[in-house]
Image (cartoon, grey):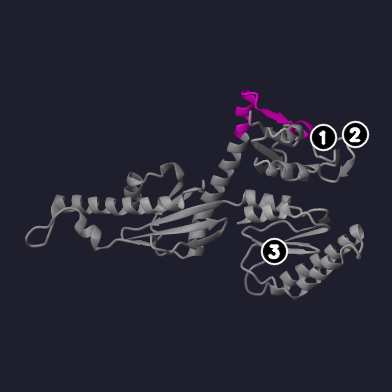
Amino acid sequence: MIKDDIKELMAYTGKPCLTIILPINAGFGNDKYNDGLLKKAMDEGKELVIGKFGSKSADALLTNLKGLDKSSLSLNARGLGIFISNDFIKTIELPVTPDYTVDAGNDFKIRALMYELDRVEHYFALVLDANLIKLFSGVGDELKEIKDGSFPKKYTDEFEHEHGHRQETGVVSGPEKSTIVETRMRSFFKIADKELGQYLQNNNDPVFVLGADKTEGYFMGETRHKARVASIIHGSYGNFTIPELVKIIHPKLQEYSAVRQQKQLDRIDSSIDKNMFTSNLTNVWNAVAEGNCRVLLVEKGFKQKARVSRDNITISENDDNSCEVEVDDAVDLLIRQALKKDSEVTFVEDGKLANYGKVGLIKRY
């Protein structure tokens, strides 16, 4: 998972560090473009590293970088993160298309990766049919069907005989037949919902339900997971391909994502009312240093030069001799400090925190 990758990158203490993040054009005919983009990033990275650290200090890094020349970016991923140092190299496939980034410094630039992680939506899609229920796991526009002992769930004879009875002729008709069919169908969806529960544990991912009115009605009448259902998409989609399902789900996923970000901003008003909010870089920095940060909210493009103390406790946005270390981006360091203290970090679009100095913090206490 990308979260585990970020922790690994944060824990690395060697230097120099080179960060390359590339958007990938997937599909036939794009290999030449992708390989050319990699070559461009390698050249820029080499120039940056030598300019900041010299070729002698980065000799092993440059050797590792040169080894990428044999790589091909003809991948199915939307993006790729490449992280290289003298004794470290790691690549991470990204499910969304990132901004092109090449950066060299004393640590890996995880902020771009954090932003990509924060904006991609993880979700489930449940496709309902009278005789078959399919479950899909989604990340952005990537969708994969779950195929295991639980799904796809087929309507079998066990449901036919579990409820109701038949006449001696074996034929059930009229109102009785309708009641038996409904009872069997509800049993089918109830069991499927129970097995769905195992996939919803340990995450807050939403569920998009796709199905005809009757089957959707049966499921919603039996499910114990109504709170997780982000949207109900009416129609018969049992025979749709994955690309067709992605096209159907995408608008609803965008709506969900917009609502989710607005809820994050709404938390600011609630925390202000409770005197649990602070803003502006210096105030937020102090709260993080004290361990009093539950949620850190940052505009995605906010960067700020500053001076900090060597223990990262004190910050000054002005020339302050008590803060010995000058950093090009104190916001990046702030994010790292918050993550180390198990705080939630959320990015918002530029301008959304204009009234708060581009950064805000919801306190723990």
Residue 227 percent location from the top left of the image: 44, 41
Residue 341 percent location from the top left of the image: 68, 41
C-alpha distance separating marks 1 and 2? 9 Å
Which residue does the image show at 28% across and 50% down from the upper left?
186
- Nearer the camera: disc 1 or disc 3: 1
**Residue lying farthest left?**
168
Q: Quadrant of residue 300?
A: top right
Residue 344 percent location from the top left of the image: 64, 41
Could you tell which of marks 1 and 3 lies nearer the N-terminus? Answer: 3
- Image mark for residue 314: 1
C-alpha distance separating marks 1 and 3? 34 Å
C-alpha distance separating marks 2 and 3? 39 Å
Residue 27 percent location from the top left of the image: 62, 71
- Image mark for residue 91: 3
Q: Is residue 52 left or right of residue 240?
A: right
Could you tell which of marks 1 and 2 lies nearer the N-terminus? Answer: 1
User: Looking at numbered disc 2 in the image, what kind of residue is underneath it?
Assistant: Ser
Which residue does the image show at 66% across and 31% down from the upper left?
363
Element type where label 1 sits in the image: loop
- Do labels 1 and 2 touch, CB within 8 Å? yes
Q: Is residue 54 left or right of residue 9?
A: right
- Nearer the camera: disc 2 or disc 3: 2
Q: Report the span colored magenta.
A: 266-284
> Which residue lies under the disc numbered 2?
322
Q: In which quarter of the image is residue 364?
A: top right
- Do labels 1 and 3 touch, CB within 8 Å? no
Could you tell which of marks 2 and 3 lies nearer the N-terminus? Answer: 3
Q: Which residue is at the front of the view, 166 or 248? A: 166
Q: In which quarter of the image is residue 281?
A: top right
User: Principal SS element in the magenta part?
Assistant: helix
User: Looking at numbered disc 1 in the image, what kind of residue is underneath it?
Assistant: Thr
